[in-house]
Amino acid sequence: MNKYHESVLLNDSIRGLKIKPEGIYVDVTFGGGGHSKEILKKLTTGSLIAFDQDQDSLINNIQEDNRFIMIHSNFRHIRLKLQQIGISMVDGIIADLGVSSHHFSDNGRGFSLKYDSIIDMRMDKKLQKDGRYILNTYNQQNLDRIFREHADFNNPRSISSAIIEARKIKEITTTFDFKKIFNSIVNKQYENKFFARLFQAVRIEVNDELNALKELLVQSKDILKPSGRLVVIAYHSLEDVLVKRFMKFGNFLNFQEKDFFGRAKSSFKVITKKPIIPSEFELKNNTKSRSAKLRICEKI
Ligand SMILES: C[S@@+](CC[C@H](N)C(=O)[O-])C[C@H]1O[C@@H](n2cnc3c(N)ncnc32)[C@H](O)[C@@H]1O
């Protein structure tokens, strides 16, 4: 049991990479290093480059293995960061999206509903906007947008109006200040789900998660060698739909682009027609895996 993070869909995702022992692989979401360590076991002369934007993950750095390079960066800079170390193409990329258990258990970072702490929510502590900034300065349209687009609320206006009224009286500073705004309106039966969606919306905005994912996917098209594999684990439908469309159509719209001759312009062959989800056994042993969806494709 890794206290920092228990890896999800470990065997299926590593199998999905179809690792060549001499290949070059990238784990763009290193976290506790669970996926990276499994990849290294399958390499001989190959190498592994890992990314994580959170400084904290560096404590899990794999020392004394000259096949491994750790890069502290957002994966949206993948191509540039790889170029800087002399790599232009790779044999496989794995992304295990979102936050790690460490983010929720660290009670000072504002990710968890359970602890009263400053609403920070930045995975990369160098980011300029944190959750507190967003909740206290965004105008109504912007607040509407994040609760509609990042959490699928049908009536985001009621949420943004409550926030705007509350902050007129007192700055929204902590997670409990934020929750308190909705205490009298929320249906107690669905309280946890409601707050989880609220927190998710703010977190996605703080870390610009959907744009970073899009940028990663677009660059993966150019970085992967023919037959190279892209393996992505998503934890909510907003991410999963981007991954699914991109793997199928090579874009984020829901249609196939055609070339001049009417041939499909596909960069990938989809390996998982349906996403792979955790087994009963994994769900029982790691409840955090419950929303995971794994998709795999291969560069043509
Ligand atoms: C679900 S955890 C990955 C866990 C890892 N696979 C393991 O087995 O331990 C996601 C990690 O990705 C990092 N992360 C999320 N978005 C990122 C981004 N855009 N760029 C770089 N790292 C990111 C988070 O800081 C977190 O450590």
Image (spheres, rainbow, N blue to C red):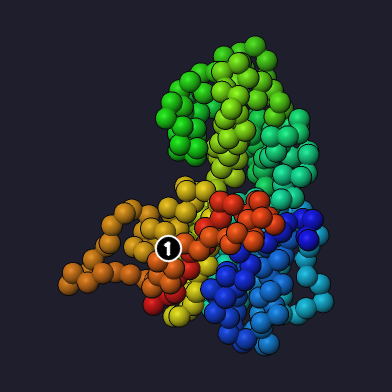
Q: Secondary structure at mark 1?
A: loop
Residue 157 sits above or below residue 128 on the image = above
Residue drawn at x 65%, y 71% as measured from the top left? 49
Where residue 1 sits in the image (x, y, percent)?
78, 61
Q: Does 27 sit above or below residue 73?
A: below
Q: Which residue is mark 1?
A: 274
* Front one among 110 and 101: 101
Is residue 158 left or right of 13 when viewed as pictured?
A: left
Residue located at (28% from left, 62% from top)? 256
Q: Is residue 112 above or below residue 291?
A: above
Name the residue rendered at 76%, 34% in the picture.
Answer: 115
The amino acid type of the residue labelled 1 equals: Lys
Q: Position of residue 53 (x, y in %)?
A: 67, 55
| Number of numbered tags placed on the structure image | 1
Q: Nearer the viewer, residue 169 or 201?
A: 201
Write the residue at 62% across / 86% down.
21
- Quadrant containing the C terminus is bottom left
Would the CB of label 1 be found within 8 Å of ligand 1?
no
Q: Nearer the viewer, residue 96 or 81?
A: 96
* Residue lying farthest to the top in this orientation: 169
- Choose top left, top right, bottom left or bottom right for residue 105: top right
Image-based side of 148 in relation to 61, left or right: left
- In the rendered structure, the answer to whether residue 176 lies left or right of residue 144 reads right
Percent from the top left, x then y, of residue 120? 69, 36
Q: Residues within 10 Å of mark 1 (few under 14, many from 20)?
A: few
Q: Is residue 79 visible?
A: no
Q: Is residue 154 visible?
A: yes
Q: Which of the 4 image quarters holds residue 245?
A: bottom left
Q: Position of residue 131 (x, y in %)?
A: 64, 34
